[in-house]
Image (tube, rainbow, N blue to C red):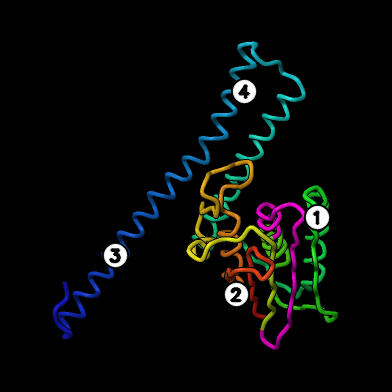
Amino acid sequence: AVASNDEVGQLARDFSQLAYTLERNEKMRREFMADVSHELRTPLSVLRGELEAIEDGVRTLDQGSMKSLQGEVGMLSKLVDDLYELSMADVGALTYRKAPCVLNDLLVHTVGMFQERLNARQLRVELELPSTPLELLADASRLQQLFSNLLENAVRYTDANGVIRIGAVLTRDEVRIDFMDSGPGVSAQQLPRLFERFYRGESSRNRASGGAGLGLAICHSIVLAHGGSLSADHSPLGGLWLTLRLPR
């Protein structure tokens, strides 16, 4: 408890803040380790169960079982790759080769990559880009990864027959790109936590509808490496509104 406003009181407040920060970091470290263990254990358990069933003759090694095994291996590989990306970002080891690039082409290409999945879920994309090229100095491959993760998030969590609107505005100093989707939305309490690792907006840990909760955390790292910002808000369409700002 701090009872004075002199130097000793300020020192006490600093110590209290330091203790709070250390406690919060330790709590986050424990949660992170628990989440990593959980995410790795799930596909490994499924793989082991499938292989034991084949070994015991309960299940035959056919095309169906092979597809199931490959799906679990793919999920495990994606998780390990995402963890590697984040660990490299933490130590500043991600390689960024910045060069002049045009965002119009990257956004059109990203939407084209997702077209089949968009059609399968009956989602409509409204791409609103200015006629002038959105030029800036950036790493095109990292921005492609960023846009893919943002669109992946929108496709995964937008209800069928919904709308995804992607718009871009060019100012003198920056480029602003908005990703909006229709429902369902997220609560006001969830918005600040969307960029935390392993955080999912849904209450259940449903692997069928959601990933490991690392996509937006990776997006945040890429944006920070470009000196930009990424924020979340409620979308006027009823879902989530992610605003990306990148310096030119």
147 relative to 211, above or below? below
192 relative to 55, above or below? below
Q: Earlier in the sequence, mark 4 or mark 2?
A: 4
x then y, percent, for residue 85:
58, 54
> Spatial distance from mark 1 to mark 2, Cα to Cα?
25 Å
x then y, percent, for residue 120:
80, 47
Q: Which residue is mark 4?
A: 50
Camera-nearest residue between 134 and 91: 134
- In the image, which is nearer the foreground, mark 1 or mark 2? 1
> Spatial distance from mark 2 to mark 3, Cα to Cα?
28 Å
Residue numbers of the magenta segment: 151-173
Other-residue count near label 2 (Cα within 10 Å), few / some / many at <14 / 14–19 / ≥20: some
x then y, percent, for residue 166:
74, 68
Q: Earlier in the sequence, mark 2 or mark 3?
A: 3
Camera-nearest residue between 195 and 138: 195
> Spatial distance from mark 3 to mark 1, Cα to Cα?
45 Å
Q: Is residue 163 left or right of residue 232?
A: right
Q: Secondary structure at mark 1?
A: helix
Amino acid type of disc 3? Tyr
Q: Earlier in the sequence, mark 1 or mark 4?
A: 4
Q: Which residue is mark 3?
A: 20
Other-residue count near label 4 (Cα within 10 Å), few / some / many at <14 / 14–19 / ≥20: many
Amino acid type of disc 2? Gly
Residue drawn at point x = 20 percent, y = 77 percent = 11
**Label 3 close to label 1 by CB (< 8 Å):** no
Residue drawn at point x = 18 percent, y = 85 percent = 5
**Label 1 close to label 2 by CB (< 8 Å):** no
